[in-house]
């Protein structure tokens, strides 16, 4: 079987506009284009030897021990042309597989991403916790990068990021930026956050709040006067709040509700939907701006009321996902079937669609 030229196939995928490239045993390379998978039929079916040859060429030496010890590893890869990629090498059915996310070299602005002005407001806050949530591949990292770049352009601060791996490289603009990668720079998120508090930061970006220790460290950082930006794999603001609280044992949940009510600034949940014209995907958003009333709901264990607050909170910059989906459907931006697949409540979606709200 002919060896794969990894830079060449990545360039081809980038020209096509793909977001991801996959190598797995007994199938030709597969790309994700506009959210859908398709085979690259011009390439042969992959086998173990070919996949491992690709892995050996791109995996950093310090990650090889991790791969053999844990059977998977994450790292970044830069092609000869300077394009960045996030790579995961893993095992499946005793064979190697590789998943590669193609990253933009430029950092898009909030305006480029058609994101609302409230996110710029979140990025300029002096302290607190801001969360961007959504399923895998929904653009969370890109949104965070755009928010961080807005802060970098508009205020003088020390930014520390902790990522696994680093996806977007931020230059020193008005801010000083230090970016730490799990593995080469620091062992894990929790220890990186603890160290960050001794490094005089103003803004801390945490790639993902994966466990209790990281959640606790992020909330502590927000409580001690820092702006903390992070992500979770949740699909709504209410789910996000409940997920954080549920990480803790029951006897600690009252305390964490109070802490979260005091530090949470906003939650933006997003999902990417294919455009009706077939030209890429567009983000549909739910935005919670934590007002005093919302803080009280969190503190008093009335998170079930958050959705109603979002629906009536337009004057505070809040956005309701079902309302946004209905608007985009009416305007012909997305298909109704795709909106229905992603809406939270079909009855609410149709109410918004028919009322024109």
Image (cartoon, grey):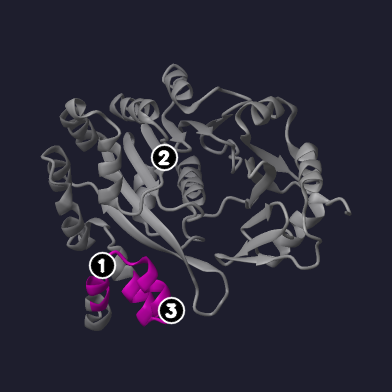
Displayed quadrant of residue 253: top left
Residue with the mark numbered 2: 230
Q: Is residue 100 placed above or below 285 in the rendered structure?
A: above
> Where residue 111 appears, x then y in whole percent?
47, 60
Please report the bounds of the magenta region as a residue range.
325-350
Instruction: Give the number of the mark in front: 3 or 2.
Output: 3
For numbered disc 1, what is the local secondary structure? loop
Give the CA distance from mark 1 to mark 3: 17 Å
Residue 258 relative to residue 202: left or right: left
List the single residue furthest toward the front.
Answer: 93
List the single residue furthest toward the right.
Answer: 2
Residue 335 image label: 3
For numbered disc 3, what is the local secondary structure? loop
Q: Is residue 10 placed above or below 162 in the rendered structure?
A: below
In this figure, what is the number of numbered marks?
3
Residue 345 image label: 1
User: For mark 2, does the 10 Å Cα neighbourhood hold few (<14), some (14 to 19), or many (20 or more) residues?
Assistant: many
Residue 340 relative to residue 141: left or right: left
Give the CA distance from mark 3 to mark 2: 31 Å
Residue 62 relative to residue 165: left or right: right
Residue at left 33%, top 27%? 216
Instruction: Give the number of the mark in front: 1 or 3.
Output: 1
């Amino acid at each position: 079987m002919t060896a794969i030229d990894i830079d060449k196939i990545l360039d081809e995928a980038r020209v096509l506009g793909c977001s991801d490239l996959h190598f797995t045993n007994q199938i030709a390379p597969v790309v994700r284009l506009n959210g859908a998978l398709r085979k690259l039929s011009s390439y042969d079916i992959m086998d173990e030897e070919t996949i491992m040859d690709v892995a050996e060429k791109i995996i950093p030496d310090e990650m090889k021990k991790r791969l053999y010890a844990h059977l998977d590893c994450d790292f970044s890869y830069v092609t000869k042309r300077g394009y960045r990629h996030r790579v995961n090498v893993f095992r499946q059915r005793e064979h190697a597989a590789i998943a590669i996310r193609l990253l933009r070299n430029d950092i898009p602005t909030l305006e480029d991403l058609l994101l609302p002005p409230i996110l710029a407001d979140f990025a300029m806050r002096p302290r607190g916790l801001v969360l961007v949530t959504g399923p895998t591949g929904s653009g969370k990292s890109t949104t965070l990068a755009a928010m961080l770049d807005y802060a970098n352009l508009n205020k003088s601060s020390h930014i520390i990021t902790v990522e696994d791996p680093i996806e977007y490289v931020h230059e020193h603009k008005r801010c000083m930026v230090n970016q730490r990668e799990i593995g080469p720079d620091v062992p894990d998120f929790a220890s990186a956050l603890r160290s960050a508090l001794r490094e005089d930061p103003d803004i801390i970006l945490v790639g993902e709040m994966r466990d209790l220790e990281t959640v606790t460290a992020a909330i502590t950082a927000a409580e001690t006067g820092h702006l903390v930006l992070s992500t979770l794999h949740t699909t709504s603001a209410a789910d996000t709040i409940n997920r954080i609280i549920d990480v803790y044992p029951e006897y600690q949940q009252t305390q964490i509700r109070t802490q979260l009510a005091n530090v949470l600034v906003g939650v933006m949940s997003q999902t990417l939907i294919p455009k009706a014209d077939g030209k890429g995907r567009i983000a549909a958003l739910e935005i919670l701006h934590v007002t005093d009333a919302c803080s009280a709901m969190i503190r008093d264990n009335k998170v079930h009321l958050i959705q109603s607050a979002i629906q009536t909170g337009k004057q505070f910059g809040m956005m309701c996902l079902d309302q946004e989906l209905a608007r985009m459907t009416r305007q012909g931006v997305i298909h109704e079937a795709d909106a229905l697949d992603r809406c939270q409540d079909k009855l609410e979606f149709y109410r918004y669609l028919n009322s024109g709200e």
